[in-house]
Amino acid sequence: MVESGSSKSSRLNSSYMVRWNEPWGVSFFNEHIVVSNQENVKTVFYDTSGNYIKEWDFSNITDKLYGNFVKDDNIYIAAGDFVIKTDFDGEVIEKLGEGIVSGVTSVVVDSESNVVVAEPYNRKIKVLKKN
């Protein structure tokens, strides 16, 4: 469970808590909990017991992170004016939608690998078609 207003992330049974400053996105992949943090611009990985595994710092390419989505061997992270696509080593593969999207806060990838984003401040949903 992620509680943005109270800046904490916890397991549903509340036996484990991590203090956060603006947690925004959470997903689950291969027994890992993946959390994007808006203010410190990091994506952090935990195991299902809440033990810290690793983190990726994206402050060199953006100043905000929002929702994340896991598909196949990639993690997609909404970053305001683009979506970061990474592999599971944290290597940035590409920045999607740069110059096309604005204010992206959430991202999903459909069955045809098209990236779908929400721009709540613009009141739009956009589909970035796979080439």
Image (cartoon, helix red, strand yellow):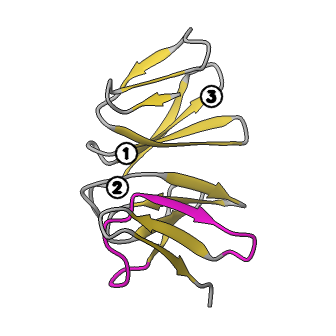
Name the spot of residue 33 as percent of width and height, x first: 59, 35
Label 3 element class: strand
Position of the C terminus, as image quadrant, is bottom right
Q: Amino acid at mark 3?
A: Asp
| Mark 1 Cα-neighbour bin, 10 Å: few <14, some 14–19, many ≥20 | many
Q: Which residue is mark 2?
A: 58
The answer to whether residue 20 is left or right of residue 17 is: left
Residue placed most toward the observer, 56 or 123: 123
Q: Which residues are magenta?
A: 97-113
In reply to whether residue 106 is colored magenta, the answer given is yes
Mark 1 belongs to which amino acid? Lys
Amino acid type, mark 2? Phe
- Residue occupying the point 46% across, 51% down: 67
**Residue, disc 3:** 47
Give me the residue at 42% from left, 20% from top: 18
User: How far separated are the C-alphas under marks 3 and 1?
Assistant: 17 Å
Q: Are marks 1 and 2 in contact (CB under 8 Å)?
A: yes
Q: Is residue 28 above or below residue 121?
A: above
